[in-house]
């Protein structure tokens, strides 16, 4: 108990009047920072204009709801009930009465204003430190009205960054596989949505089986596996234009694709004669390089963020384990040595950790280890779960989880979940259908 | 009215019988499950189809394995004989894995299993030109149950006529 209080003091009590609040995101946050998200104020003319264009009664409240929801689901913040707010939004944005916000125990306050200017949406917002009675940040954006959700995400990212010292992950999208129908004849489609589940859109019709879509970290391109014409091969898809193409000319199955960190190469497996090796293809000059050459199954490759190393799983030891090698295939080292099988390694965008799936004694775990294999930490245990994908700031993992099916074929579901690197804040992500194989995009705006 | 009553009584008796037999079959099935696997390789027949009389279409594998069992080799020899007799027929070998593995590894494992079957057919004189390998990983189970028997049925390589 004393320890807990100490930690709290360390994090939240400013050392002097000028030291501003800070949130520590490196440990499980059992006491999220209480903050107030005042609805963005809006004048009547602007309100009516946006109501006409966007069919939203009060766009100021809608944007602040997005901010509030993002900050809450991060697990680091506790947005307070708006009913307790004493100060009107428009006045608070000019000059907060800090004693009022202090009274309801808010440590930070977000205020703002929305205007309709030349057919555009103009949003300004301010972040205030209530205890220090100081403005921490003030920013304004102008954009087309249809971008209103993204404005909410960008504000959330700015607030997150200012209070934690690290980039946020709210102005991002998730690409995943939507699933429907009986388990023996599953219909799968590529789908994309905002990180908070809004704007869900299907990218394929479900005529052929599609698996494992992954974002290019540098553009709005994805790579995935499609069974088009019953030939499982890696494809590229430009989300903006809808153009698709096969990657490389391989006489057999290519699978497990991912982009290099600069987005210029695809790394994937090619299966032939019972062995699977890792290859890369340069997207500019189309040159294909063979990276591993072993009679085993080498698959699920993932680059380190500097592009110098590759982690992958292989059963060359007899069972599926995780390895790291240089990007030319040399210097292969096994890094997983715990009990059980290890697969789907993905390098953290921060570079320090590798997330993985582990199967041990009939249970599946999502875990992380250092890139030399030390410091293994299991974050979550379940009947079946796999395929972790990192948030762009390397603080959250998204993965999918399946439930058991009884002998009548009932009870099956597949859903997306997220969990913090700390092992706390596990959340189910709402999707219109069952879902699997999630991949997190980079920040859309920087 | 009286007839109705008689009918009703008979129905009750019949239903009682059904309940009893249902119990009896249940027990039999339970013992059957034991008899349907050797180690964890499926040895039953309820998912097996036939390419021709006496020519089963599929072989089964142990968890994470692609080694052909004695029974699998016998099945594949029958398939090779049938293919030799029918030189106009080409086949697709569809390799599958159970749901207890990561998706990408399972795709590779399905490919390895189908290739084990392909290699064996080739040693019995079937040209590789007549054989296409297609892995489905864990995407197309025959039994959707989450239990060891269902998984054993799903770890398979199925020979399908391509034309």
Image: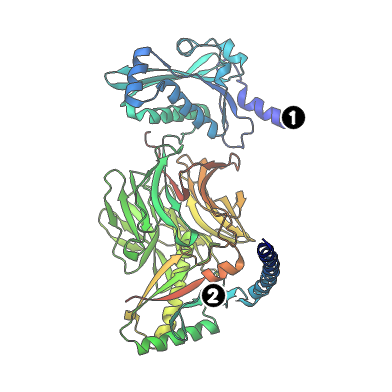
Label 2 SS = loop
Q: Position of residue B86 (x, y in %)?
A: 34, 87
How many marks the image carries: the answer is 2
> Alpha-carbon distance for marks 2 and 1?
64 Å
Q: In front here: A305 or A157?
A: A157
Nearer to us of marks 2 and 1 is: 2
Q: Which mark is residue B46?
A: 2
Q: Which mark is residue A181?
A: none
Residue A207 as seen in the image, left or right of residue A314 = left
Q: Position of residue A264 (x, y in %)?
A: 32, 50
Q: Which residue is mark 1?
A: A2
Residue A56 as seen in the image, left or right of residue A288 = right
Identify the residue at image location x=31%, y=53%. A236
Q: Position of residue A237 (x, y in %)?
A: 31, 50
Q: Residues within 10 Å of mark 1 (few under 14, many from 20)?
A: few
Label 1 SS = helix
Q: Quadrant of the C terminus of chain B?
A: bottom left
């Amino acid at each position: 108990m004393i320890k807990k209080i100490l930690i709290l003091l360390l994090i939240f009590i400013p050392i002097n009047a000028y030291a501003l609040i800070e949130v520590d995101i490196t440990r499980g946050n059992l006491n999220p920072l209480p903050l107030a998200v005042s609805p963005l104020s809006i004048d009547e003319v602007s309100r009516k204009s946006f109501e006409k264009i966007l069919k939203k009664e009060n766009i100021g409240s809608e944007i602040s709801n997005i901010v509030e929801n993002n900050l809450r689901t991060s697990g680091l913040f506790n947005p307070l009930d708006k009913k307790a707010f004493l100060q009107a939004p428009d006045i608070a944005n000019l000059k907060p009465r800090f004693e009022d916000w202090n009274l309801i125990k808010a440590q930070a306050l977000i205020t703002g204003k929305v205007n309709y200017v030349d057919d555009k949406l103009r949003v300004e917002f301010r972040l205030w430190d209530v205890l220090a009675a100081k403005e921490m940040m003030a920013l304004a954006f102008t954009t087309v009205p249809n971008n209103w959700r993204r404005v909410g995400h960008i504000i959330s990212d700015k607030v997150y960054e200012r209070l934690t010292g690290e980039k946020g992950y709210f102005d991002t999208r998730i690409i995943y596989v939507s699933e429907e129908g009986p388990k023996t004849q599953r219909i799968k489609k590529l789908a994309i949505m905002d990180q908070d589940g809004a704007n869900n859109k299907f990218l394929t019709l479900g005529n052929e089986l599609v698996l494992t879509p992954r974002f290019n970290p540098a553009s709005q391109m994805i790579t995935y596996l499609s069974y088009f014409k019953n030939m499982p091969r890696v494809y590229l898809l430009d989300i903006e234009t809808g153009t698709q193409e096969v990657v490389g000319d391989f006489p057999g199955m290519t699978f497990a694709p991912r982009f290099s960190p600069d987005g210029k190469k695809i790394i994937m497996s090619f299966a032939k004669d019972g062995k699977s090796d890792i290859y890369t293809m340069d997207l500019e000059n189309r040159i294909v390089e063979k990276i591993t050459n072993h009679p085993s199954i080498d698959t699920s490759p993932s680059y380190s963020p500097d592009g110098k190393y590759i982690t992958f799983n292989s059963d060359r030891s007899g069972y599926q384990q995780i390895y790291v090698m240089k990007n030319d295939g040399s210097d292969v080292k096994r890094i997983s040595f715990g009990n059980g099988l290890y697969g789907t390694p993905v390098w953290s965008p921060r570079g320090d950790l590798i997330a993985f799936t582990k199967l041990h004694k009939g249970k599946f775990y999502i875990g992380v280890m250092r890139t030399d294999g030390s410091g293994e930490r299991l974050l979550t245990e379940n009947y079946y779960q796999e395929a972790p994908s990192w948030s762009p700031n390397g603080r959250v993992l998204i993965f999918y989880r399946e439930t058991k099916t009884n002998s009548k074929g009932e009870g099956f579901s597949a859903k997306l979940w997220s969990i913090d690197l700390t092992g706390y804040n596990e959340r189910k992500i709402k999707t219109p259908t069952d879902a699997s194989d999630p991949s997190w995009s980079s920040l859309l705006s920087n | 009215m009286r007839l109705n009553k008689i009918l009703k009584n008979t129905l009750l008796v019949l239903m009682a019988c059904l309940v009893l037999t249902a119990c009896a079959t249940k027990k039999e099935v339970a013992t059957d499950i034991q008899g349907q696997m050797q180690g964890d390789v499926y040895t039953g027949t309820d998912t097996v189809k036939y390419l021709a009389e006496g020519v089963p279409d599929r072989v089964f594998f142990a968890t994470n394995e692609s080694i052909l069992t004695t029974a699998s080799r016998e099945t594949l020899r029958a398939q090779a004989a049938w293919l030799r007799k029918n030189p106009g027929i080409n086949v697709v070998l569809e390799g599958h894995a159970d749901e207890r593995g990561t998706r990408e590894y399972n795709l590779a494992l399905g490919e390895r299993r189908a290739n084990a079957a392909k290699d064996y057919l080739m040693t019995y004189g079937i040209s590789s030109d007549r054989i296409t390998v297609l892995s489905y990983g864990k995407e197309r189970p025959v039994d959707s149950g989450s239990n060891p028997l269902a998984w054993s049925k799903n770890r398979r390589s199925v020979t399908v006529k391509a034309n």
